[in-house]
Amino acid sequence: MGSNSSNMNHIPDGQQLLQDTGFSAAQIIRLYERFEFLDKDNTGHLRPEDLETVPDLDMNPIGARIIGAFFPPGKETLDFGSFVRILAHFLPADSNRTRAGAQQEPANSTTGKLRFAFQLYDQDRDGKISRDELLQVLRSMLGLQVTEEQLQCIAERAIQEADADKDDAISFDEFRKSLEKVDIDHKMSIRFLR
């Protein structure tokens, strides 16, 4: 562990990230190496184009939306701390071990994971998933496998089932309720290297 501590000294905000995210020192060091690899220009920041080189994202039908989740509106670059804090959403829920003294709910809690997933749909960030936003995701995921009419039916049914307040959109609370029986912790977890 001594070597991990000394390696952490050259990582920007390394100790704070250790406290805030639930990642171990070895995981943060590995993520820093990956960040540096993706940072082809050696600027200390990533751009969307840098993340597009990740094969799993490049091949994912909603890869562009996932990449967009790393970059809030108006932000064109991503520093290492932000990179790690976003990836913390994908830590298994049992990884909350190092968050002593943290004030807010961990990113890898069920609610944190759901908020992250919700924003992949809510592209205009108005707090609701509209029929058009849902259709955009369905088109990306299902593409040519189904007709436009079938996509419309799927979107209509999803909204009808989730839209408790009948405003023809899905709020975060409705989204969360509609996914109560889904094991979000499992579906949105990546086993990071220890």
Image (cartoon, rainbow, N blue to C red):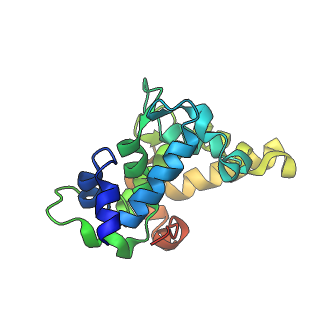
Q: Position of residue 190 (x, y in %)?
A: 52, 66
Q: Is residue 52 left or right of residue 96?
A: right
Q: Residue at x 37, y 55 (%)?
A: 173
Q: Residue at x 49, y 69 (%)?
A: 193
Q: Look at the image and tell me whether residue 135 can be seen.
A: yes
Q: Is residue 106 left or right of residue 192?
A: left
Q: Residue furthest top?
A: 74
Q: Nearer the viewer, residue 45 or 118?
A: 45
Q: Quadrant of residue 3?
A: bottom left
Q: Nearer the viewer, residue 164 or 173?
A: 173
Q: Nearer the viewer, residue 48 or 141?
A: 48
On the rendered image, what quadrant is the C terminus found in?
bottom left
Q: Residue at x 47, y 29 (%)?
A: 43
Q: Is residue 130 left or right of residue 23?
A: right
On the rendered image, what quadrant is the N terminus found in?
bottom left
Q: Quadrant of residue 139?
A: top right
Measured along the vertical axis of the image, is residue 7 above or below residue 183?
above
Q: Position of residue 184 (x, y in %)?
A: 48, 68
Q: Is residue 116 left or right of residue 161?
A: left
Measured along the vertical axis of the image, is residue 97 above or below residue 90?
below
Q: Position of residue 62 (x, y in %)?
A: 65, 46
Q: Look at the image and tell me whether residue 163 can be seen.
A: no
Q: Residue at x 71, y 48 (%)?
A: 61
Total residue callouts: 0
